[in-house]
Image (cartoon, helix red, strand yellow):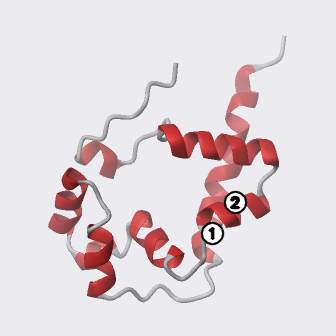
């Protein structure tokens, strides 16, 4: 019987690549308050209120804001991952993006996002 650890290997490959996506960005991250307000407008109400409470300076460290800013400049996470992941790992990422991560972030717990049942 095959060990169950193989199920977690894609996560071990996907996570670091997402971090590299931010590090490999072709521009320094220099958002404006206008970028921040535009990004807030894309968030659902509970999430938007949470990030408004955090404020612009704190949200500069939020990956969702960084990703929004980069994607407005045509540097897309999905394109980056598609280029660097095996097709099966990219399919796993797509499934994660559709159903939510198995591991909620502290931000997600704060504004009460309900994650999809993984069973």
Q: Position of residue 5 (x, y in %)?
A: 72, 27
Q: Earlier in the sequence, mark 2 or mark 1?
A: 1
- Vertical arrangement, residue 51 with respect to residue 70, above or below: above
Q: Is residue 31 left or right of residue 74?
A: left
Where disc 2 sits, the SS reads helix
Q: Residue furthest top?
A: 1
Residue 23 location, x and y as percent? 60, 75
Q: In the rendered image, which residue does mark 2 sit on?
A: 81
Residue under numbered circle 1? 21
How many other residues sit within 10 Å of disc 1, few (<14), some (14-19) or many (≥20)? many
Residue shown at 60% from the left, 70% from the top:
76
* Residue 20, above or below 3: below
Residue shown at the point (39%, 70%) measured from the top left: 65
In the displayed structure image, the side of residue 35 where residue 94 appears, left or right = right
Q: Quadrant of residue 104?
A: top left
User: Nearest the camera: 11 or 97?
Assistant: 97
Q: Residue at x 78, y 19 (%)?
A: 3
Vertical arrangement, residue 67 with respect to residue 11, above or below: below
């Amino acid at each position: 019987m095959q060990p169950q650890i193989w199920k977690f290997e894609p996560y071990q490959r996907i996570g670091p690549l997402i971090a590299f996506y931010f590090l490999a960005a072709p521009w320094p991250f220099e958002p404006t308050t206008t970028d921040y307000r535009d990004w807030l407008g894309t968030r659902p109400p509970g999430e938007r209120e949470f990030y408004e409470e955090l404020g612009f300076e704190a949200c500069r460290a939020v990956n969702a804001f960084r990703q929004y800013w980069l994607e407005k400049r045509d540097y897309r996470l999905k394109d980056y991952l598609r280029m660097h992941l095996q097709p099966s790992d990219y399919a796993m990422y797509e499934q994660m993006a559709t159903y939510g991560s198995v591991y909620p972030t502290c931000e997600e717990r704060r504004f009460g996002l309900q994650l999809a049942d993984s069973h």
